[in-house]
Image (cartoon, coloured by chain):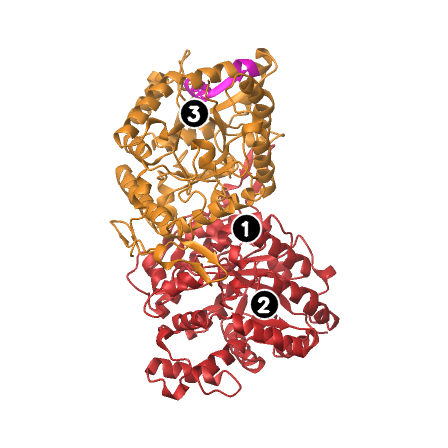
Chain colours: A red, B orange
Amino acid sequence: MVKPLSFSAFVMNTASHIIHGLWRDEKGQQINFQNIDIWIDLVKKLEAGGFDAIFFADVIGLYGNYKDGWEHHIKAGLQIPSNDPMTILSALAVHTKRIGLAFTAAPLQEPPFNFARRVSTLDHVSNGRTAWNIVTNSQENAYRNFGYETLVAHDERYRWADEYVDVLYKLWEGSWEDEALLQDREKGVYANPAKVHKIHHVGDYYRVEGPHLVAPSPQRTPVLFQAGASTAGRSFGARHAEAIFIVSPNPESAKKLIQETRDLAVKYGRHADDIQFYQGLSFVIGATEEEARKKEAKLDAQIDIDSILAHAGSGIGIDLGHLDLDSPIEDIETEGIQSTLQWLKQSVTGDVSTVRDLLYLRSKANRIVGTPKSIADQLEKWHDAGIDGINVINAIIPDSYEQFITQVLPILRERGLAKPLEQLEEGKTFRHALFGADKLNKRHPATQYRGAFSGE
Amino acid sequence: MVKPLSFSAFVMNTASHIIHGLWRDEKGQQINFQNIDIWIDLVKKLEAGGFDAIFFADVIGLYGNYKDGWEHHIKAGLQIPSNDPMTILSALAVHTKRIGLAFTAAPLQEPPFNFARRVSTLDHVSNGRTAWNIVTNSQENAYRNFGYETLVAHDERYRWADEYVDVLYKLWEGSWEDEALLQDREKGVYANPAKVHKIHHVGDYYRVEGPHLVAPSPQRTPVLFQAGASTAGRSFGARHAEAIFIVSPNPESAKKLIQETRDLAVKYGRHADDIQFYQGLSFVIGATEEEARKKEAKLDAQIDIDSILAHAGSGIGIDLGHLDLDSPIEDIETEGIQSTLQWLKQSVTGDVSTVRDLLYLRSKANRIVGTPKSIADQLEKWHDAGIDGINVINAIIPDSYEQFITQVLPILRERGLAKPLEQLEEGKTFRHALFGADKLNKRHPATQYRGAFSGE
């Protein structure tokens, strides 16, 4: 039997997330992202349509300079303004009953004691549908918003993240035992003090006494998402993540990456299928191939290429604002840029002469264009490469998701590549939907703290 | 014309908030505080019934020891477990249209950049109905949950809070100018970079570069609540607060406190009525005085006196767990306790011999018992002493509020002491409901940052 794929909607509480410039489209609602109603409307549609999760990306500072400053980011709505994703999830939780609710947050943002409490509260509000995408920030401005003079070094950030999650695991898994909460009106005993513990964490970055203030939520630890692609990031993911988001250029490279990460997870004592992999893809859907190509041409004409450059440049720490798009790649002399362009070139297929050609092909690398049937054929290849789900990137909200739900998902269901709607159960936790159990399995490092603090 | 009173529901996202032991009552829903439905149900009732705000208290650590430990707190549900109040407000916001949504938070909890963003996000979600009760924590365990070895000294805490709100004001009032957000689809300009500014804050406690990530919310700065009663606390309140919560033993002392604080506010360049005062009171309502007294006797029998002692002892930093309740006050030899008991004695009226007598009278000091009519008579006295509103303390949720709404408010409306329901307008900001304007007036210190960062 074919294992069906899962589907996550990849969104951000901002004007322009990934396919930049599309906020201008007349059908789009993203322009009004500050209005909670567009998110409530979207999450209801996703839930009714069979999506498994809505997943909010986030930043906590400006991207790096473009053309020597950040004016462009403001003008283009390039992830600024952006509202806090975690804050809106309880509003989405009370308007849904099944879908997973994932947000992004970094250790930089909030002391672990407070973060643990907020996440546990959200897990109560959502009846166990919370997921956390663990990131370590790479925007310099983010660090300067949080008291630092500049970026904390990359590997150091992961050591910091390791301790951060360690504190959280102690609070979520170890502080309250399963039978601690009694709520006994008769005897007047709300909870059993023998089963609630301080954690006395003392580390390099944090000192946290505990106890956790929140009684165990349905999942305790939220479902853990991760997306880091560096060596330190992949090691972190292999140890901690339950779902890893990848953006591979093709199914073959996804297959290789997945195998390597699963091997690493096994090395850390986990099972290969303790981690699920979600490939980020966007879709342009037409009734015919020709119509799909026409739609794609219209989409390409709407794309804000400056924002694509600003976004990509920030990712590699280089201001690409002065790049001549019509220059042949070989003529670009700045060393860091030249090597990045060569690296990008290897990830695309097609004729590439100028920088513009390359960026165009790269922007299409994670886009599938075609009829619902040909898209399903492509997704079958991704499925066969071993991905567990698709992280669906949008061009237009809610349009991109409505089309995917009404046109692509039915065909995937016919082929057994998507779960039948009637199999999607309300009232289960998000982890139960993904792995068949509410709590982390015993191979996860968080679970070492179960029962570890008795007597504290 | 009589100025009507405002009404706030004083609650906490925990098992046992103030009138301890009542979570056991068979009619009470507080026992299930972890279930968001009880809060949605309550806030809808409050809004329909004419309340102006729901106000969540909070703690971020255990109260001080009682009988040498914290076992009692767990057993009694004494503000533990407790869930984060801010996290649930967006869920309440999307189920209401008018009522103010107030939460408590301390500088200790979260870096100002992150806090500013979450509050602004919540103010967007609620269409301008957010209020923040600024506290500086006094639980030692709270500090040990956030990296400190022990309490930060009291006056130091207020200097810290001063800088914390200063950073927030810069982000909320100064970073984005009013006309910054354009959302111009035609021209492809989301916001005007000339009107968005970094704040470059460098102080003793924080370095924050900015810009604020969130475009101006309906109120910009949330409505500012405060409750500190110390000298430093009152100075802080006189400078920053728009609503101050007091727990005076009688109208006369409230009148004096209000006058002193208003005088202080005027000294700081604000107007006397830039601050509103809310007196905390609970109510026992009967059809006759006799029935009310019977209900009170039943209530008194349900009260968990140990939790009252633990709560009060933590407030003064003394473990009252070893106190002999039936001892005459004069026989208590521990010096700190003796002086506290003498201080308490001055705040109550009635015959006091033993410690138990004193605690009983003190617990009644902020309780009004009677028929709806006699309660209205009492509230008239508080009104005439100059309070602007009542912070209604509950014994049982939702019962205490349902009774107040159906029995007391109608009589207050007849006397002009409560606003007619038809005058309560949906779609206004909370500040507009209190002060007739969405934004802070120019006398408030936050507003010094409007236009202060042009060119940054």
Q: Is residue B370 magenta?
A: yes
**Residue at mark 2: chain:** A
Position of residue B373 relative to residue B108, above or below, is above
Can you tell which of label 1 and label 2 is closer to the viewer?
1
Outermost residue to the front: B186
Residue at coordinates 58% horizontally, 71% vertically from top-left? A282
Distance from label 1 to label 2 (Cα)?
21 Å
Q: Is residue B236 left or right of residue A2?
A: left
Q: Position of residue B419 (x, y in %)?
A: 52, 25
Per the image, the residue denoted by label 3 is B388
Mark 1 — on which chain does it sit? A
Q: Position of residue B258 (x, y in %)?
A: 35, 23
Residue drawn at 50 percent across, 71 percent down: A303
Check disc 3: other Cα within 10 Å, few if <14, some if 14-19, many if 20+: many
Name the amino acid, label 3: Asp
The residue that label 1 is drawn on is A36
Identify residue type, mark 2: Val
How far across and how far down the image is residue A286, in percent?
66, 73
Q: Which residue is mark 2?
A: A392
- Main SS type for the magenta part? helix
Q: Closest to the observer: B162 or A430?
A: B162
Q: Earlier in the sequence, mark 1 or mark 2?
A: 1
Q: Are marks 3 and 2 in contact (CB under 8 Å)?
A: no
**What crowding class fits label 1: few (fewer than 14 Cα within 10 Å), some (14-19), or many (20 or more)?**
many
Q: Give me the chain letter of mark 3.
A: B
Q: CA distance from mark 3 to mark 2?
A: 52 Å
Q: At label 1, which amino acid type do we have?
A: Ile
Image quadrant where one finds the N terminus of chain A: bottom right
Secondary element at image label 2? strand
* Residue extent of the magenta highlight: B356-375
Whether tag 3 and tag 1 are in contact, CB under 8 A, the answer is: no
